[in-house]
Amino acid sequence: MSITRKIGQIIDVLREDERVGKGDDFEKYVVDLFDENYFSVAQWTTDIARKHDRFVESDCNPDLVMRYRYKGREELFCVECKFRSDLYQNKLDWTNPDQLERYREYQRETNLPFFVVIGLGGSPDHPERMFSIPLAEAKYPALYASVFERFERDPEKPFFWKNGHLS
C-alpha cells in the first residue's frame, strides 16, 4: 500500500471521528434541553456498529425515545438529533433515503410521535439555529428553507411538550 493511500485512509478515519463526535455532542446538548422534572430518557441509541463491523438493527432507530410525565400522565415520543454546520446547495441535508424510510417504518410500528431536531451552524454544543420538525413534515432527505424554517425554535430554550407537539 502506498504512503499516499495510507495517509488518505487516516484522514478518512479522522473525519469520521470528528463527524461522530459532533453528533454525540449535539445529542447531549439536546438531552440537556429536556427538563428532568418532566422528561426522562426512555431509550438512547448507542450506535454500537461504530465499535463493530456488523450491522446492528437498533442503530437504525431514532437517537432518543423520551418520556414526558406530568400530573400522572405519561407520553412517549421519538427524537432524531442531527447537527449540520451549514446548508448544502441551499437545502438542509439531514439524512439519506434509506434511513428516512427506516424512521418512517419505526414510527408506523411504534405509533409514537417522531421529531427530527436539527442544529444548524455554530457548534454542536451551541448551535446558532435549531429546528424541531415532525417526521411527517420532513418528507425528503434534504429540506428547503420553506419547510424547516416553519419549525424553528430558540436553541437555548428548554423543550416544551403539549398535545403531541414538541417545541
Image (cartoon, rainbow, N blue to C red):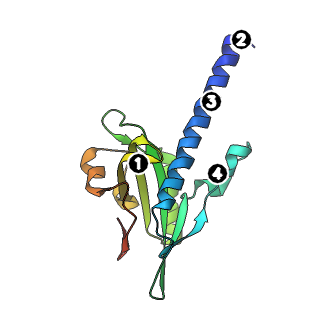
Mark 3 neighbour class, 10 Å CA radius: few under 14, some 14 to 19, many 20 or more? few
Q: Residue 16 in the image: x percent, y percent?
A: 60, 34
Q: CA distance from mark 2 to mark 4?
A: 31 Å
Q: Residue 140 in the image: x percent, y percent?
A: 38, 48
Residue bearing mark 2: 3
Give the quadrant of the N terminus: top right
Residue bearing mark 4: 47
Decide which of tag 4 and tag 3 comes sooner along the chain. 3
Task: Tell whether 162 sits left or right of 37.
Answer: left
Mark 4 neighbour class, 10 Å CA radius: few under 14, some 14 to 19, many 20 or more? some
Residue bearing mark 1: 119
Decide which of tag 2 and tag 4 comes sooner along the chain. 2
Q: How many marks?
A: 4
Task: Residue type at mark 4: give it.
Answer: Asp
Task: Residue type at mark 3: give it.
Answer: Leu
Labelled pair 1, 2 in contact (Cβ < 8 Å): no
Say what secondary structure mark 3 lies in: helix
Q: CA distance from mark 1 to mark 2?
A: 37 Å
Say what secondary structure mark 1 lies in: strand
Q: CA distance from mark 4 to mark 1?
A: 20 Å
Choose top left, top right, bottom left or bottom right for residue 131.
Answer: bottom left
Decide which of tag 1 and tag 2 comes sooner along the chain. 2
Labelled pair 3, 2 in contact (Cβ < 8 Å): no
Rendered residue at 46%/66% (across/down): 34
Mark 4 vs mark 1, foreground winner is 1
Residue bearing mark 3: 14
